[in-house]
Image: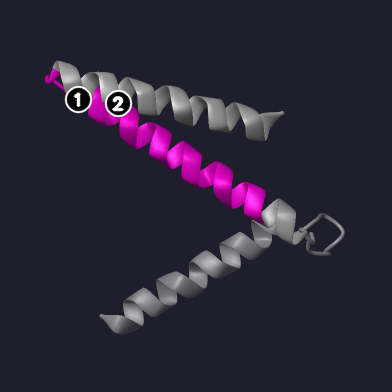
Amino acid sequence: MARGWESKSIEDQKLAAELNSHPDGSTPRFSAEEVAALHRRNVLELNLSRVADELARCANPRFRIQLESELAFLNAELEKLTL
């Protein structure tokens, strides 16, 4: 089983390298700030989808208010990164 996971990981790494390479064969270089911003955006988008899913299933009015507030906060943070 471990061998299967290992080969899958290697396949994923190769695919990521292909997707991140330029047509001329060079790989893009991101600054630490760009990497941090991309990571932050990814985390915000994942949290946004989680909160939206929870909100869709929520029946408790008080918890619904909390989720709507969290959704508004996440949207505002995402807007800050977009600008």
Q: Position of residue 48 (x, y in %)?
A: 41, 33
Considering every residue shown, the one lying at the far bottom of the view is: 3
Q: Which mark is residue 63?
A: 1
Residue 32 rendering spot, x and y as whole percentages: 72, 61
Residue 37, image x and y in percent?
65, 48
Q: Main secondary structure of the magenta part?
A: helix
Q: Label 2 is placed on what type of residue?
A: Leu
Q: Is residue 46 above or below residue 59?
A: below
Say how many tags the image has.
2
Determine if the magenta segment contains residue 52.
Answer: yes
Is residue 30 toward the left or the right of residue 19 in the image?
right
Quarter of the image holding residue 20? Answer: bottom right
Is 40 magenta? The answer is yes
Dot 2 surroundings within 10 Å: few (below 14), some, or many (20 or more)? some
Tag shown at residue 37: none
Which residues, given as a range, are shown in magenta? 36-60
Secondary structure at numbered mark 2: helix
Which quadrant of the structure image shows residue 2? bottom left
The answer to whether residue 10 is left or right of residue 26 is left
Image point (78%, 64%), residue name: 27
Quadrant including the N terminus: bottom left
**Residue drawn 83% across and 64% down?**
26
Q: Position of residue 46 (x, y in %)?
A: 42, 41
Quadrant of the rendered image containing residue 8: bottom left
Circle 2 residue: 67
Q: Which of the image's four quarters has the C terminus?
A: top right
Q: Nearer the viewer, residue 27 or 40?
A: 40
Label pair 2/1, CB-CB below 8 angstroms: yes
